Image (spheres, helix red, strand yellow):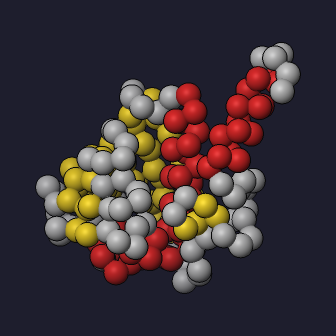
Amino acid sequence: MNTIHLEKKIDATVSRCFSAFRSLKTLHRWYDSRAQMSGFRVGAEVHASYFPGYRIAVVIPNHLLVQEYTTVIDGIGVWSFVTRGEASRIVFDHLASGNRGKEFHARMFHWQGLMENLAAVCESRTIPFVEGAYVGRLPRGVRFATCDQHVRAVATRSRAAQGQGV
């Protein structure tokens, strides 16, 4: 099992961040505009058109959400919500055997984009990541607009670090 780990400070309450998963209307804004959900409880499912579909495995309101991915990718996603004053720290871990090689970096890029979208929606901003690519100005810390650019850059750095040149 390989883990993708991301953290993001969001200038919104934990309750607001957590509710972005609970509301289909809000899920459409930051996750997948064509998603369908059977509810927000253990065993409920979200079917998505571009991003992974999932089954909800654990819900501890305003603290923890665990998703078991059913389409597009394998593994589980663990979302933790931590209060930091008026802000929140969102911690995401994707544990999956498929998180390796180029696929690891492609998944990391997409999860980072979704985390940026979650922050934007919770902070009442325009989402920056649409169907796998950043549009407009890149968010702070993001260097590439597309997954292909990101994966190629990682591969180039890896070959250079191994002394293989570019």
| Whole-percent x, y for residue 10 in the image | 56, 68
Q: Residue furthest left?
A: 43
Residue at screen point 59% across, 81% down: 125
Residue at screen point 42% across, 42% down: 94
Up-down relation of residue 137 to residue 111 (above or below): below
**Does residue 41 show up?**
yes
Residue at screen point 23% across, 68% down: 37
Total marks placed: 0
Up-down relation of residue 106 to residue 13 (above or below): above
Up-down relation of residue 135 to residue 69 (above or below): below
Q: Quadrant of residue 24?
A: bottom left
| Whole-percent x, y for residue 115 in the image | 52, 60
The answer to whether residue 33 is left or right of residue 7 is: left
**Does residue 10 show up?**
no
Residue at screen point 34% across, 39% down: 74
Which of the two residues, 25 or 5, is positioned nearer the viewer here? 25
The answer to whether residue 55 is left or right of residue 21 is: left
Q: Residue furthest top?
A: 163
Which of the two residues, 62 or 153, is positioned nearer the viewer here? 153
| Whole-percent x, y for residue 166 in the image | 83, 27
Q: Quadrant of residue 123?
A: bottom right
Up-down relation of residue 161 to residue 152 (above or below): above
| Whole-percent x, y for residue 1 in the image | 39, 27
